[in-house]
Image (cartoon, grey):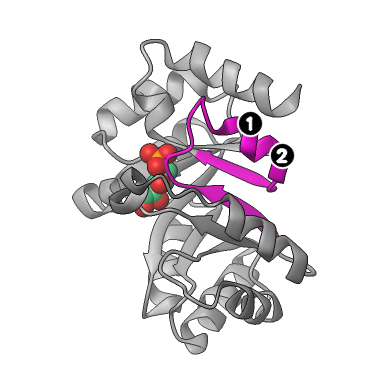
Amino acid sequence: MKLQFALDRVDAKTALQMVARVYDVVDIVEVGTPMILREGMHPVRMIKEKYPALMVLADTKIIDAGSIESADAFEAGADIVTVLAFAQDATIRAVVKTARDLGKQVMADMVCVEDVAGRAVELDGMDVDYICLHTAIDVQNTGKTPFDELALVKTVVKNAGTVAAGGINFNTISLAKKYNPDIVVVGTALTGAADIRAAAQKMIRTIRE
Ligand SMILES: O=C(CO)[C@H](O)[C@H](O)COP(=O)(O)O
């Protein structure tokens, strides 16, 4: 299981300082949607230029203009982009084609999808690399976690990898271990830690021990 470190709530300068502390601990750094909306692709470009060997995910949450928006993120240095799973199939296919042409990857974000199993099968058939079960920030206070949906999706997908995201912290990381997605995404539990490096190392130990 890989650890994806999500940077949502900080500016690009702080993000770069945080990445400097953990680039050799985490597997993937995510430039989150709020940061992209504030600062565009600048943080993606900065992180990739400084750490070319580090996997960078741009959480673009594409809903339309699949080839244009994914190409922009890939050109800035993203290795993986996200597309919303409920986007039209034409958009999903355009993002996947752009990724294939450039040797990059696509993660479909299942936030707000109701027929989780059915859409996961369709996305698998459209050749996305990862399907992300995601509890939105705005509903994390209800106690919802992505793990039940993750367990369901794991029973129906054949090729795509699986990802769990949304409010995962030191109390719930053991569930990630139990349900074993290919990637677990952690943001606030790390960015809010007094010592980010020690927290990321503890998280890695927990998922790999
Ligand atoms: O995609 C996101 C929000 O849309 C976040 O990156 C994801 O929820 C992980 O962050 P956190 O652990 O803080 O919830």
Tell me where residue 207 sits by quadrant. top right
- Nearer to us in this view, 70 or 88: 88
The secondary element bearing badge 2 is classed as helix
Residue pointed to by mark 2: 178
Q: Residues within 10 Å of mark 1 (few under 14, many from 20)?
A: some
Q: Amino acid at mark 1?
A: Ser
- Point out residue 50 in the picture as x, y percentages from the top left corner: 46, 31
- On whether ligand 1 comes within 8 Å of the CB at mark 2, the answer is no
Question: Horizontal placement of 138 versus 4: left or right?
Answer: left
| Segment tinted magenta in the rendering | 161-185
The residue closer to the viewer here, 206 or 91, is 206
Q: Which mark is residue 174?
A: 1
Q: CA distance from mark 2 to mark 1?
A: 6 Å
Q: Is residue 140 visible?
A: yes
Q: Please name the amino acid that badge 2 sits on.
A: Lys
Callouts 2 and 1 close, C-beta under 8 Å: yes
